[in-house]
Image (cartoon, grey):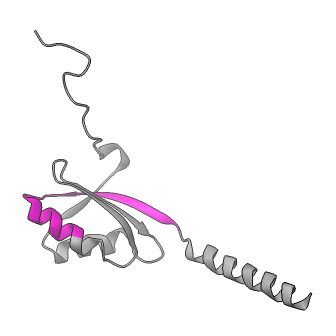
């Protein structure tokens, strides 16, 4: 019985520890001027390895970079500095400024 209790207690401690690791993930989109695929590669390779960065979406066409990050490890200002180190100017876009990919033209209607 004692062994079972120890195992149950260890499982509880491990779960509590795991929950502690699941910090809040925040998301921010920056307007970043990129000219070519090598700019995209440079951003992808470097920003992805910044402390706390969980995910990264680079959209050269829309000139945006969306970063998901753990807000206990980094913040928006640190991310901007990371872009600046790479010689990119990153401006945070507010929710309503984030442009969703455009729907393809000519779907469902005809031009005459």
Residue 101's x, y, as percent? 26, 40
- Does residue 111 appear left or right of residue 44 in this picture? left
- Does residue 50 appear left or right of residue 27 in this picture? left
Is 107 located above or below residue 18 in the figure? above
Q: Residue at x 19, y 48 (%)?
A: 62
Q: Quadrant of residue 43?
A: bottom left
Camera-nearest residue between 12 and 100: 12
Q: Residue at x 56, y 76 (%)?
A: 21
Q: Quadrant of residue 75?
A: bottom left
Q: Residue most toward the top?
A: 112
- Does residue 96 appear left or right of residue 34 in this picture? right
Camera-nearest residue between 1 and 88: 1
Q: Residue at x 36, y 59 (%)?
A: 28
Q: Quadrant of the C terminus?
A: top left
Q: Is residue 110 magenta?
A: no
Residue 39's x, y, as percent? 12, 65
């Amino acid at each position: 019985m004692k062994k079972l209790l120890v195992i149950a207690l260890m499982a509880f401690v491990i779960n509590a520890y795991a929950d502690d690791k699941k910090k809040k993930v925040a998301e921010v989109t920056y307007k970043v001027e990129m000219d070519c695929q090598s700019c995209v590669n440079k951003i992808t390779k470097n920003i992805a390895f910044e402390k706390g960065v969980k995910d990264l979406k680079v959209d050269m066409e829309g000139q945006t970079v969306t970063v998901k990050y753990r807000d206990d490890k980094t913040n928006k200002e640190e991310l901007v500095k990371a872009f600046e180190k790479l010689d990119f100017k990153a401006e945070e876009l507010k929710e309503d400024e984030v442009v969703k990919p455009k729907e393809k033209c000519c779907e469902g209607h005809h031009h005459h």
